[in-house]
Image (tube, helix red, strand yellow):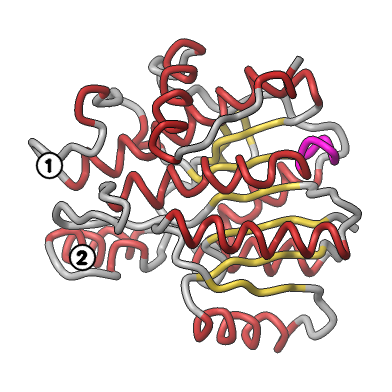
Amino acid sequence: MNTIVVTGATSGIGLESVRLLAGEGHHILAVGHCQANCEKADRDIKAGLPDTKIEWYAADLMQQREVLRVAGEIKTWLDTHGDGRLYALINNAGCARSWYMTTEDGYEQQFALNYLSGFLLTHELLPYLIAAKGRVIMTSSQSHKGIKVHWNDVMLSRHYNPLTAYKQSKLCDVLFAQGLNDLYRAKGLHAYAVDPGLVNTDIGNKTAGIVDLVWKMRKRHGVSPTVPAKTYHYLCNQASAPTALYYYLCKAQKHSREVTKENAARLFALSERLCGVRYETEAAS
């Protein structure tokens, strides 16, 4: 079966996606925040599916040095065991914050983890994805609608609002998927953004503050993570790659009008500067 990388793999949507895809025989390279979480998730899955093929990697993807480190470990595995091919990359790691917090690189944490980590990890694994004519899946949100990228202060350092920061990061996920398609679809690569809907996970309860209080109330009305996991499964398992950009409950949906080729290209250029990398455009020719 195929090799699939999943980030944010130790809980919630990521964990259920790993369980579903590994249960069908896919070889999963799963990335979690820390070793303890990885070991716990592995025991959870193996209790019901003892023969699944899962390799676990611990990395704090909020920090760019950690993204680069784990990308190196994954590339070594793909070169040694995966025939240099990666069928799918699910960039699912995410967070919510109640106040302005930065990474060691100086970037606002929601922007760094929810979006920029996926941008950088995809860059590092791009040759393997192109070799497999693979798929990149970003975890976005319905909340990406009704907002614009704050181009002059993308970290929102001057007027920080945690919900605005979260929404902007999810808009960037859709724009990134659009940009990947614009650059690399001719090479067989397909990129998508998924709206999981309101899901009963702990994403908003990992730091104290207003987000923690609000999320404790909201998540009670959310669906089980097994529901959105089916959309990731759908996008990975279609023999012919689906052609739409944005999906909810396994069906194509309309995305924000802010998702244009022009905005996607502008975000690409900004993200390259923030990550100190350059996507090779000649690979798309």
Give the quadrant of the C terminus.
top right
Q: Residue 22: percent from the left, percent from the top?
A: 77, 67
Residue plotted at (36% across, 48% down): 112
What distance separates the C-alpha of mark 1 from that of mark 2? 17 Å
Secondary structure category for the residue under label 1: loop
User: In the figure, 172 relative to 106: above or below?
Assistant: above
Q: Residue 9: percent from the left, percent from the top?
A: 57, 66
Q: Residue 207: percent from the left, percent from the top?
A: 23, 69
Which residue corresponds to mark 1? 160
- The answer to which of 112 and 200 lies nearer the viewer is 112
Q: Earlier in the sequence, mark 1 or mark 2?
A: 1
Residue plotted at (12% across, 42% down): 160
Residue 3 occupies which quadrant of the picture? bottom right
User: Hey, which residue is sitting farthest front in the picture?
Assistant: 276
Residue plotted at (54% across, 27% down): 253
Mark 2 closeness class: few <14, some 14–19, many ≥20 residues within 10 Å: some
Give the quadrant of the N terminus.
bottom right
> For residue 130: magenta?
yes
Q: Is residue 41 left or right of residue 96?
A: right
Q: Is residue 186 left or right of residue 159?
A: right
Query: Of the residues tagged 1 and 2, which is closer to the observer?
Result: 1
Which residue corresponds to mark 2? 212
Residue 170 occupies which quadrant of the picture? top left
> Which span of residues is magenta-colored?
129-134
User: In the figure, 181 relative to 193: above or below?
Assistant: above
User: Hey, which residue is sitting farthest left in the picture?
Assistant: 159
Q: Residue 278: percent from the left, percent from the top?
A: 55, 30
Secondary structure category for the residue under label 2: helix
Residue type, numbered disc 2: Asp
- The answer to which of 71 and 243 lies nearer the viewer is 71
Residue type, numbered disc 1: Tyr
